[in-house]
Image: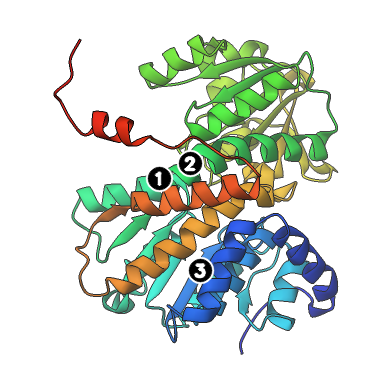
Amino acid sequence: MNYDVTNLKLAPMGKKRILWADNDMPVLQLVRKRFASEKPLQGVRLSGCLHITAETANLARTLKAGGARLALCASNPLSTQDDVAAALVKDFKIAVFARKGESRTVFYKHLSSALDNKPAITMDDGADLVHLLHSKRKGQAKDIIASMEETTTGVIRLRAMEKNKTLRFPVVAVNDADCKHFFDNRYGTGQSTMDGIIRATDILLAGKKVVIAGYGWCGRGAAMRASGMGAVVTVTEVDPLKALEATMDGFNVATMREAAVFGDLFITLTGNKHVLRAEHFRKMKDGAIVCNSGHFDVEIDIPALKAMSKKVTKQVRNFVDEYTLSRGRRIYLLAEGRLVNLAAAEGHPASVMDMSFAVQALASEGAYKKKGKLDVRVYDVPRQIDEWVAKLKLQSMNIDIDRLTAEQKKYLASSGEGT
């Protein structure tokens, strides 16, 4: 088995972390138990470009239990947990190509290594494998039954490809499943983003003026958690409906040009490019902190910030770089502009990833069962998968819900009764 991880001696701690996370992933445990019995992915080559965390490890264990022949690489150079990567190789015999802090060159080498597995199914967190299969590895595209996409940024890219008629195989938008974006994006991103910021800076959020760029599901979660910790939250948006929603949720709404003047902490969560740029850096106060919790490191225009700076001091704290501008003003960039919740912390809690990865595993099974029957387009996750995962999650939390009576079912199915 080929692999490339930082140090196999880290495996014992990684295994402990994987099993600890598994305790809080009961739905995925049930999927794994059935997969181990039925082997729905027997012999299927599957390559995943995902954040290599303890939670992802339990998804990988589930896919392997279902019979898949796996290869994994990281979807971000800073998101790999090296001890988990080591344990996946040593204890669970899964090929992993990922090192925390790997260079751009190594990152793309690892993507290619994952595709050397000759997959029939791919899993992406940002559509990087799909991109390679449409550029440098075009010859493999014909062998792909389907690809699963885990994050908003990737789905945006893939829907654009579908619209432009350049997509070459079916894709399932796992990110758009209700059990994913309602919970993972909102509660997972909200909590883990604050966790990463606090670990990196040790700042007190209470009383801070926090600027949230983007009020999608991730932005909602970050705004909610920052507000809950006592911050004064301002939201910036380009979508009038989302801006109106943020206003009615009780947040101040302003342009980034306005917010740049008073913000203490800026968090980008848009999936777009150069949301924070030179015109904003010029207005920021001394000591302003900027970070990103969107998938790619392009939301903050780091080259512009560097060009404006008289001095750049790396690692004034772990994951904190200091950029000194004119008149001695300092702007602090966290985690090199990459995902602060994964680079400076541990990513989403296992409990919320339980739902996302259960959906991921079941969507993969469903796509394989429909081999050769799927049109080349972006598919939503079937509603029954969402409902099944939600019901099991409620059961694991000892929560019961009401059920429709026969009379209620009849009423909803008919149009005979009026006022």
Measure the alpha-carbon separation of dots 2 and 3: 20 Å
Give the amino acid type for the residue marked by disc 2 in the picture. His
Q: Secondary structure at mark 2?
A: helix
Quadrant of image for the C terminus: top left
Label 2: which residue? 181
Task: Estimate the x, y position of residue 114 in percent, counting from the top left.
Answer: 51, 76
Residue occupying the point 50% across, 68% down: 48
Vertical relation: 112 (above or below) 265:
below
Q: Nearer the viewer, residue 106 or 341?
A: 341
Label 3: which residue? 48
Residue occupying the point 84% across, 68% down: 13
Q: Secondary structure at mark 1?
A: helix
Give the amino acid type for the residue marked by disc 1 in the picture. Asp
Q: Residues within 10 Å of mark 3 (few under 14, many from 20)?
A: many
Give the amino acid type for the residue marked by disc 3 in the picture. Gly
Q: Earlier in the sequence, mark 2 or mark 1?
A: 1
Question: In the image, 417: left or right of 84?
Answer: left
Q: Secondary structure at mark 3?
A: strand
Q: Earlier in the sequence, mark 3 or mark 1?
A: 3
Q: Nearer the viewer, residue 352 or 160?
A: 352
Task: Estimate the x, y position of residue 242 in percent, counting from the top left.
Answer: 42, 20
Question: In the image, 168: left or right of 155?
Answer: left
Label 1: which residue? 176
Measure the alpha-carbon separation of dots 2 and 1: 6 Å
Callout in the foreground (2, 3): 2
Quadrant of image for the N terminus: bottom right
Contact, mark 2 vs mark 1 (Cβ under 8 Å):
yes
Residue occupying the point 65% across, 45% down: 397
Measure the alpha-carbon separation of dots 3 and 1: 18 Å
